[in-house]
Amino acid sequence: MTISVSSLSKHFQVHKKEPGFSGSVKSLFIRKYETVRAINDVSFNINEGELVGFIGPNGAGKTTTLKCLSGLLFPTSGEVFVLGFVPYNRNPEFLKKIAFVMGQKNQLWWDLPAMDSLLLNKEIYDISSERFNEVLDDLSRILNVKELLKVQVKKLSLGQRMKMELIASLVHTPKVLFLDEPTIGLDVLMQRNLREFIKEYNIRYKATIILTSHYMGDVEELCKRVIIINFGRIIFDGLLSSLVEKYSPYKKIRAVLTQYADPKKIDRLGRVSRFEYPELILEVPNKKANLIAVSILKNFQVEDITIEGPQIEDVIAKVYRENKR
Ligand SMILES: Nc1ncnc2c1ncn2[C@@H]1O[C@H](COP(=O)(O)OP(=O)(O)OP(=O)(O)O)[C@@H](O)[C@H]1O
Ligand SMILES: [Mg+2]
């Protein structure tokens, strides 16, 4: 087991000030605190090489969880083990094996070329020159940024900078990656680029990866398994496909007919959500979609037919809605 989390909670005490000047004065003498339960009794295990999507609405507790896993935060209660280490001890051996990448934060020096920051990381992580060159070569080739390594970071585009950030976080080839919204703010092409890279890194280095993202495309393309957190509690942990199955067991078949058909015959196919000649839209169980499509092709005059799976976005929105506090 690469990551094991049991009954993890993280609560913050936040100072609550009453509004206005008198509130400020009062708060000098009487401090009122409020407890924010960012994560509550969270448990899950992740095996080596898994690439897990960790999703939930804003403020759900994703970043807080990742911070506990990487040792940036001390848990209020519960136990966390990553690669056999207790993260908040910040053991140097542990730090060499993990990376925490945040989409909105940067570690690179703005006025220097990325290469300078990379060389610093080489020293920090004590990487041999041979290994460093090999990995850098590999990563910059996959990300297609070889010729940008010597360009001042502030002159790079957001996407280019994000790629450099990734390289900086990965030159020590960590075995466990915590990726917190790595594709935030990037255009569609760059998002796809980065996904390819994450996939490749996962396979090449047998890395265990937890990824948070608000872009369902990231999750859909990269993660077989998803963990959904809401109000600091896990509300789903399992295969993305079974989530879709559970919350949206239907597919849509859309057909364009070339000859008018008897509505009674069409009714027998499945639930008709629309039939206005020449367009026919049916809602059918996921598993029967192919068979029904075939039978439409066989029994009717059809110009065009498509099967639409449920939109992951819709499924997730439904899960969030059904799990309101
Ligand atoms: N240092 C802190 N002090 C007080 N409250 C905090 C602190 N960090 C996080 N919180 C609170 O904990 C809750 C969870 O925050 P967290 O950043 O983990 O959410 P998230 O799931 O990452 O959300 P987002 O999708 O917006 O990034 C929020 O209510 C947040 O305000
Ligand atoms: Mg966050």
Image: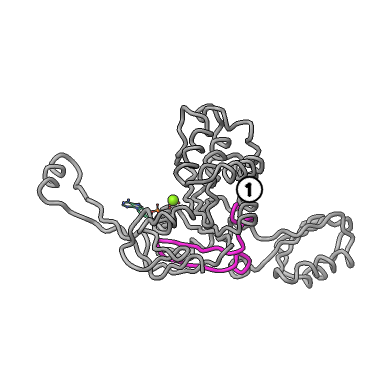
Q: Which residue is mark 1?
A: 197
What residue is shown at x 58% (from left), y 53% (from top)? Answer: 216
Q: Would the CB of label 1 be found within 8 Å of ligand 2? A: no
Amino acid residing under circle 1: Phe
Q: Is residue 190 visible?
A: no
Residue 138 x/y as whole percent? 64, 44
Q: Is residue 127 visible?
A: yes
- Quarter of the image for residue 129 reads top right
Residue 108 on the magenta span: no
Q: Which residues are magenta?
A: 217-242
| Numbered disc 1: secondary structure | helix
Could you tell me which residue is drawn at 15 percent across and 42 percent down? 24
- In the depicted view, which residue is nearer to us: 88 or 221? 88
Could you tell me residue 263's position as x and y percent? Answer: 80, 66
Q: Nearer the viewer, residue 222 or 264?
A: 222
Q: Give how far across and how far down residue 169 sits, in percent.
A: 51, 45
In terms of image quadrants, where is residue 209?
bottom right
Image position of 101 with respect to 75: above or below: above
Residue 241 is a magenta residue = yes
